[in-house]
Amino acid sequence: MEEQMAKIDLSNISHTYNPLDPKPTYALNPFSMTWENGKRYAILGPSGCGKTTMLNIVSGLVRPSKGEILFDETPVTDLKTEDRNIAQVFQFPVIYNTMTVYDNLAFPLRCREFTKEKIEERVKAVSDTLNLSSFLNSPARKLTADQKQLISLGRGLVREDVAAVLMDEPLTVIDPDLKFRLRRNLKEINEQYKTTLVYVTHDQNEAMTFAENIIVMDQGEIVQVGLPKDLFEKPKTTFVGYFIGSPAMNIFHSTVSSDHEVKINDATIKTNSNLGNLKDKNVKLGIRSEFIELAEKEKSNTVKIKLTRVEDFGNFKLLTGKMGDLVIKSKVEREKPIPDGELNLYFPPEKCCVYSDEKLV
Amino acid sequence: MSKLYTFLKYFFITFWTVFVVAPFLWAVSTSFKDFQSVNSKVTYIPWLDFEPTLEGWRVLIKSPAKGGVDIVEPYFNSIFVTCTASLISIVLGTLAAYALSRFTFKAGFVRNNDITFFFISQRIMPPIVLSIPFFIFLSTIGLLDSLLGLVVVYIVLLMPIAVWIMVDFFNRVPKELDETALIDGCNPYQAFYKVVLPNSIPGLIVAGMFCIIFGWIDFFFAFILTFTEVQLLPVKVVALNSSITPWWSLSASALVSVAPLIIVAFIVERYLSKGNLSGALK
């Protein structure tokens, strides 16, 4: 009966919460995706973009309006939650108030009729990992909010054979210090037991440090799936550019002037994108503030800006400048001397992304 | 300021305590008096002011044939009817409330809230409106003047209370709790009785308390729907009255009638003071 960890396929899934409406609004637009066994995924996106709906579809709490879910090629769309062998952790601690910590952790195993010895062994292992060993016999409701969340997490991790552990912003209530340690613990658990972990968050740092693959969502749409590096350097849409990175990507309205060049105000910027068929069209140029360099003097691919603000973040300085009515932000090393007034910024061509209709060219 | 506050606080508490306890003390004292000590002059303290007698209590357990009134049978009838009706109301009411809290119902213009209101509306109606329909209903099915008939009627009266309290309670139990139980491997029924129900004990206690109180104190339906075969306590206590008011046995019967509610209050109070019910009562 126990299925082992599985590859999860979401095939042509879409979901609406008002299917009877003549014009249903979709919480999730049709998409297909595969979650490989044993990997760490983060689903990243603003609130209300469909992240939680996606998790609930996988765990079976929500039946998708259309499409199919397969665990290891076996369709499970019609399988009930309790038969799916999925663990899910919610944003706020959900604990069984009337039970002790031990019984809370043992509950998923007892429901699945594991032997007493096995239960004891697993509960001990999980409580050691989560620093809950000294509370095992206390009533769960007596614990603090972050300890309660550890219990929720523990109930997800206590079953070794789950197809995936789905976590819906699980570390919101936990203090930053513990958060950091827990993320590392989760990583270790994933590496040790090869449990697939899916982690929903709206915090890009959390996503970037935790996951191997990041799924960026916006308004029920999957915008980009990729490694943290790809999302950072080559955002597929302007949304990803805005959403990922701090500060957000610099994005300028510009016009294509030749095969590889765009014009922002008067400055001509060379890029590595092929813009042959977009000649004279309006596009957007995106570049990360991290990649913009200070230039000694005017040369090709530089723009002249008027410095309006310098913020010292300790490990770097954030320059804000204006070119006409465009605002440009650039991160520079703290030690670098910043000339007053006007200065030249260099845009490396390989780091410039051109967007037509908000999509990467 | 704080001294004045403390003074006012204790003054009010003392005043209220006297206000609540005095009638009881009066009833206790009166129940041990005889005709002479009640009617001749004002008396307070036993042995000093008057000679206490157990006559007021004795008539309560003597059969009417021996000059008594016998409230023992009505007493147990009341316990049986109240407990049975409360229990059934709580069981059915809790299930209904869970459904109303967790599922979305839709029939024409009727939604969950309308169904909940329908339950409560049973209590908004003046009871006299229901008396004739109940009378006809019970006489049609042959349950007039029977314990079973009273149980049926009391379920109708008590279930709205149970539904109302439990819907409110379940609405404040996060649905993630049920979902977590499902994910942990319970089927929906197990999720209900292994996880949701144990979490709802405070609500169940409050609902049970209200059901027992309202069931126990009802006079109106007990009076209308019974005659000779079956009598409930409130009706019997009122029947004690006669041309010469027997204050002593009335006091004694009032005390024994209130006793179960005091016991219930003590049990519930233990939970209240533990803070377990804070959520249930809001």
Image (cartoon, coloured by chain):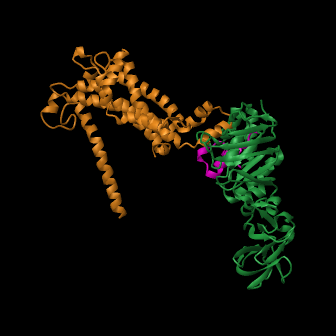
Between A216 and A86, the residue placed more toward the observer is A216
Question: Magenta segment: does it hold A152?
Answer: yes
Determine the residue positioned at 49% across, 38% down: B111
In the visual, does A219 lie left or right of A260?
A: left
Q: Does residue B165 appear in the picture of this structure?
A: yes
Q: Drawn colour of chain B? A: orange
Magenta part of the protein: which range? A131-159
Q: Position of residue B109 (x, y in %)?
A: 48, 37
* Residue that protrudes farthest toward the bottom in the picture: A340
Determine the residue positioned at 80% across, 61% down: A360
Q: Position of residue A58 (x, y in %)?
A: 72, 41
Between A18 and A42, the residue placed more toward the observer is A18
Q: Position of residue B225 (x, y in %)?
A: 31, 21
Q: Tell me if residue A347 comes above or below residue A139 in the rendering.
A: below
Q: Tell me if residue B137 comes above or below residue A40 in the rendering.
A: above
Q: Drawn colour of chain A? A: green
